[in-house]
Amino acid sequence: RAAKLDAEGAQFLLGLVGCETFEHENHLSLVFELMNCDLRNGLKKYGQGGGLPLFPTLRSYAKNIFSALRALQRINVIHGDVKPDNLLMSLDKSVVKLCDFGSAMEASEQIRTDYIQPRYYRAPEVILGQDYGTQVDVWSAGATLFELATGLILFRGGSNNDMIHEMLKTTGAFEREFALSGDFAA
């Protein structure tokens, strides 16, 4: 569906190789295009004492990530699991593609829980129990890009309360209306 509305962005979503499937130990297996590694391992392999070594590489990866998210937004789909582990680097390291759509959902069918998205990449709207849409993937992408640039996790908290505290230390206070709205706001 994404390719019909946004061919440019859809090229940064990991694709199946034709309709290749096979069974292995009673599990249906799908065949995807061959990639190098995920960005978490790429950061370990190719990072130089922290983030990725070249700004042009980071800029190119950012464009790939936001193009993929734009393609999903155009079909009203929330990925829900954007993080370095779900971004795969091409064999020549020039392109990254978004993978693992196991948490993806139609934006209109959002689940109001504070456990959508991995904790370190979780948007404040999700933590507070507010209505959310595809913008939560943009938050996760921003946190991911910070990690790729610095080698550090932007918000490292052991709980949702810790995460909000870390966000407030970095961004300053949320607007009062925003902070008090949502099913989980205190």
Image (cartoon, rainbow, N blue to C red):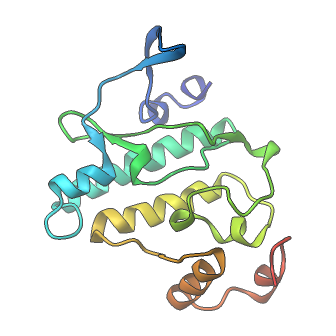
Above or below, comparing residue 170 to residue 44 in the picture: below
* Quadrant location, the C terminus: bottom right
Q: Residue, x 47% and y 17% (percent of image)?
A: 30
Report whether 82 appears left or right of 34.
right
Count of numbered circles in the view: 0
Report whether 63 appears left or right of 160.
left
* Quadrant location, the N terminus: top right
Above or below, comparing residue 58 to residue 78 in the picture: below
Above or below, comparing residue 108 to residue 166 in the picture: above
Q: Residue, x 49% and y 41% (percent of image)?
A: 68
Residue 172: image location, x then y, percent: 58, 91
Report whether 86 appears left or right of 127.
left
Residue 148: image location, x then y, percent: 31, 62
Identify which residue, 52 or 44, lies in the foreground.
44
**Displayed quadrant of residue 15:** top left
Residue 110: image location, x then y, percent: 78, 49
Q: Residue, x 54% and y 31% (percent of image)?
A: 6
Residue farthest to the front, as pictured: 25
Identify which residue, 67 or 133, lies in the foreground.
133
Q: Residue, x 81% and y 44% (percent of image)?
A: 108
**Displayed quadrant of residue 93:** top left
